[in-house]
């Protein structure tokens, strides 16, 4: 058996926000093999080992929905927990006296009750392109970055039900200028995308490395395995607050089993079931978990996209959880540019200015007020946030 694998748990019923800090806890399980299929016993042993680690961490978790190496192997989800499993590594699997012992290392993030609002966070995922396209020549996988973008979008929608996700088939910036992007340049680009798409959080990045290398077997110099790298750089920006929430790099590597002249079809599920495909999905899952964590407890903010004689129109609707009668506060945004590369953006709630939802459809809402002066005060592309929430009340003290 492979000594180190990755297991990811996708909890369909769990959409609670999570904290940034996490701990690794070791768990162990031993089951008799007897006449049962080894794969079935192995999956049960993995689940029991995860439960053992969860118990040691003070969490009560029933792990029934398991994705092993990027492939769903069990579809039922059930969780009662004070923590959330981010990732699991299998440290060892041994069979002795017809008993299988599995030792795992579990990364558990404590769940806390952040004072968030009820609305879905709006996310725009831009296309992740290859930083060095020539690396794709071996296997003819020039569309690999596009496929990774789709997997990020799909996993975000599957893992976090409080996100409203849209995929844009265009890169955040060209590869030539990516490494030269300064914070203020990123904020300005994100602000433009937010203004045109109505999305608050912008997810972008690129595939930094998919180069090949040979790994020599130290026991047999003539035995060399062809392996391939996968390095993914990910950024998340809150475009309405000019805040960089996440900047991280994720790396993995796996055997590349295709011949040099082969043209690999990345649209085919057989590719994603190969060792390299599974490891790539695991890497995407790790990034998606961190993206969800970065966004989960941020205040929902949206912009005014149109003005009516008796109201304003904002870019949030029933798809994001807006209902008739909901209340929103007006935020006035002011950017202070100190240098061409850095800036400070502040949103200040306007005292005693409140709007109520009078009409709503899937992607937009009409907000009105009993006071005409409030309507006159609001300007196109001003921001609004849910009223009477601790997050809204504290925005005036927050800076990136």
Image (cartoon, rainbow, N blue to C red):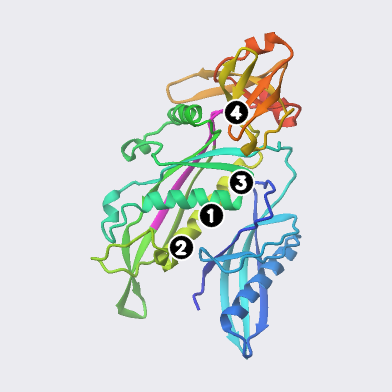
> Whole-percent x and y of residue 226?
32, 69
Judged by depth in the image, the label closer to the viewer, 2 or 4, is 4
| Secondary element type, mark 1 | helix
Residue highlighted by disc 1? 286
Distance of mark 2 from mark 3, alpha carbons?
21 Å
Q: In this view, does 258 lie above or below 99?
A: above
Q: Residue at x 57, y 49 (%)?
A: 157
Upstream in sequence: badge 1 or badge 2: 2
Mark nearest the camera among 1 and 4 is 4
* Residue carrying label 2: 279
Tell me the number on the disc at residue 293.
Answer: 3
Could you tell which of marks 2 and 3 lies nearer the N-terminus? 2
Q: Where is residue 332 in the image (x, y as percent from the top left)?
A: 61, 18
- The magenta segment is 230-244
SS for dot 3? helix
Between the C-alphas of marks 2 and 4, the distance is 36 Å
Q: Residue at x 70, y 38 (%)?
A: 118
Cα separation, mark 3 vs mark 1, equals 11 Å
Task: Return the mark for residue 302.
Answer: 4
Taking the magenta stretch, the answer to whether it contains residue 212 is: no
**Of residues 182 and 197, which is closer to you in this image?**
197
Q: Which of marks 4 and 3 is nearer the N terminus?
A: 3
- Left or right of residue 110, residue 177 in this image: left
CB within 8 Å, label 3 to label 1: no
Marks 1 and 4, the one that precedes in the sequence: 1
- Secondary structure beneath disc 4? strand
Mark 4 vs 3: CB contact within 8 A: no
Mark 4 to mark 3 CA distance (whole Å): 20 Å
């Amino acid at each position: 058996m492979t000594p180190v694998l990755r297991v990811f748990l996708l909890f369909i019923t769990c959409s609670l926000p999570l904290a940034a800090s996490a701990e690794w806890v070791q768990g162990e399980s031993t089951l008799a093999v007897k006449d049962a299929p080894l794969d079935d016993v192995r999956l049960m042993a993995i689940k029991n080992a995860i439960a053992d680690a969860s118990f040691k961490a003070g969490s009560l978790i029933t792990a029934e929905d398991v994705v092993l190496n990027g492939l769903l192997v069990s579809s039922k989800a059930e969780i009662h927990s004070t923590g959330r499993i981010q990732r699991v590594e299998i440290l060892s699997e041994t069979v002795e006296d017809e008993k299988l012992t599995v030792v795992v290392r579990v990364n558990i993030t404590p769940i806390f009750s952040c004072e968030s609002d009820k609305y879905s966070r709006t996310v725009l995922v831009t296309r992740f392109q290859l930083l060095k396209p020539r690396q794709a020549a071996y296997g003819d996988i020039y569309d690999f970055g596009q496929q990774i973008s789709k997997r990020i979008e799909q996993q975000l929608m599957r893992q976090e039900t409080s996100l409203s996700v849209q995929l844009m088939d265009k890169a955040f910036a060209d590869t030539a200028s990516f490494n030269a992007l300064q914070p203020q340049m990123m904020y300005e680009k994100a602000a433009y995308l937010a203004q045109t798409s109505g999305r608050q959080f912008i997810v972008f990045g690129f595939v930094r490395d998919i180069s090949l290398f040979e790994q020599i077997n130290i026991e047999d110099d003539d035995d060399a395995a062809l392996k391939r790298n996968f390095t993914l750089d990910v950024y998340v920006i809150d475009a309405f607050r000019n805040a960089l929430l996440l900047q991280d790099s994720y790396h993995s590597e796996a055997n590349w089993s295709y011949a040099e002249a082969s043209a690999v079809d990345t649209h085919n599920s057989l590719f994603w079931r190969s060792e390299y495909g599974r490891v790539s999905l695991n890497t995407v899952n790790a990034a998606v978990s961190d993206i969800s964590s970065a966004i989960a407890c941020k205040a929902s903010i949206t912009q005014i996209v149109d003005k009516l004689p008796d109201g304003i129109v904002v870019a949030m609707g029933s798809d994001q959880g807006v209902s008739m009668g909901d209340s929103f506060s007006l935020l006035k945004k002011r950017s202070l540019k100190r240098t061409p590369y850095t800036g400070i953006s502040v949103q200040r709630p306007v005292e005693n200015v409140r709007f109520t939802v009078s009409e709503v459809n899937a992607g937009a809402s009409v907000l009105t007020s009993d006071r005409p002066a409030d309507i006159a005060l609001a300007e196109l592309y001003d921001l609004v946030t849910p009223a009477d929430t601790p997050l809204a009340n504290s925005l005036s003290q927050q800076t990136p």
